[in-house]
Amino acid sequence: QKEVEQDPGPLSVPEGAIVSLNCTYSNSAFQYFMWYRQYSRKGPELLMYTYSSGNKEDGRFTAQVDKSSKYISLFIRDSQPSDSATYLCAMSAGGGSNYKLTFGKGTLLTVNP
Amino acid sequence: DADVTQTPRNRITKTGKRIMLECSQTKGHDRMYWYRQDPGLGLRLIYYSFDVKDINKGEISDGYSVSRQAQAKFSLSLESAIPNQTALYFCATSDFISSVTDTQYFGPGTRLTVL
């Protein structure tokens, strides 16, 4: 079983839709959870991070972590064509190994006008 | 100017050639990383460096070497390129002070094709 599983999609939605992106993980040591966004021909950029179970909101984006189920989600409300990108989840155990990020394979999202 | 720059942005080379990819950062971060990204495989860590004198292998270091010339510069070399090293290569940096969250900042990437 891979440490981090992420549905690669592709996911295509109409503008204004609510988007749900998900990752599951198997390593109980993961404590820090991040979502990166990667536009075509660009490097990944950090979108959100969280280190506790529950929800964290930033504008139209909400990151959700359920450590008991080893499941994280990213919700995008009122999706826009500019949200079209690949979304990567990433996790680390923190502490002495906090440099080591384990990435999901990414989900390709297209928001259609 | 971009905080993390990579040169070249695109490179096509032939099997057996030596290739160097360069990364520079103006963020003042102490930690630097090299990743490769392949379709269906995601991002994989090749090498990482916590400071100029500290260089470590990542999960896929075979066939690669690195040099940390200064705090701001980290180069990746392919001594004898082979076709399965065709990929998108990213440099990233992070700051030890804020590394509790391990926020890594990525460069724009180098698309390498080995024929």
Image: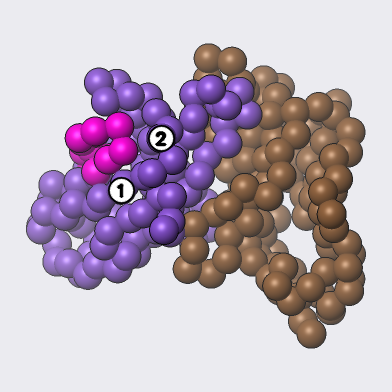
Instruction: Calculate the distance from the C-alpha at mark 1 to the C-alpha at mark 2.
Output: 13 Å
**Residue A71 locus on image (x, y percent):** 80, 38
Mark 1, chain letter? B
Horizontal relation, residue A30 to residue B76: left or right: right
**What type is the residue that disc 2 sits on?**
Gly
- Please tell me if label 1 and label 2 are on a single chain: yes
Residue range in magenta is B64-75
**Residue A6 locus on image (x, y percent):** 68, 50
Chain B display color: purple
Q: Would you say residue A19 sits in the magenta stretch? A: no
* Residue on which disc 1 sits: B23
Horizontal relation, residue B70 to residue A79: left or right: left
Image quadrant for the N terminus of chain A?
top right
Horizontal relation, residue B70 to residue A102: left or right: left
Q: Hey, which quadrant is residue A57 in on the image? A: top right
Mark 2, chain letter? B
Say which label, 1 or 2, has the lower sequence index: 1
**Residue A48 locus on image (x, y percent):** 71, 44
Q: Is residue A59 visible?
A: yes
Residue placed furthest toward the bottom: A113
Element class at badge 1: strand
Majority secondary structure of magenta residues = strand
Residue at image location 25% in from the left, 21% down from the top = B53
Seen from the viewer's position, the closer of residues B36 and B30 is B30
Residue placed furthest toward the left: B17
Q: Residues within 10 Å of mark 1 (few under 14, many from 20)?
A: many
Letter of the chain shown brown in the rendering: A
Residue at image location 10% in from the left, 58% down from the top = B17
Residue A17 position (above or below residue B33): below
* Residue on which disc 2 sits: B28
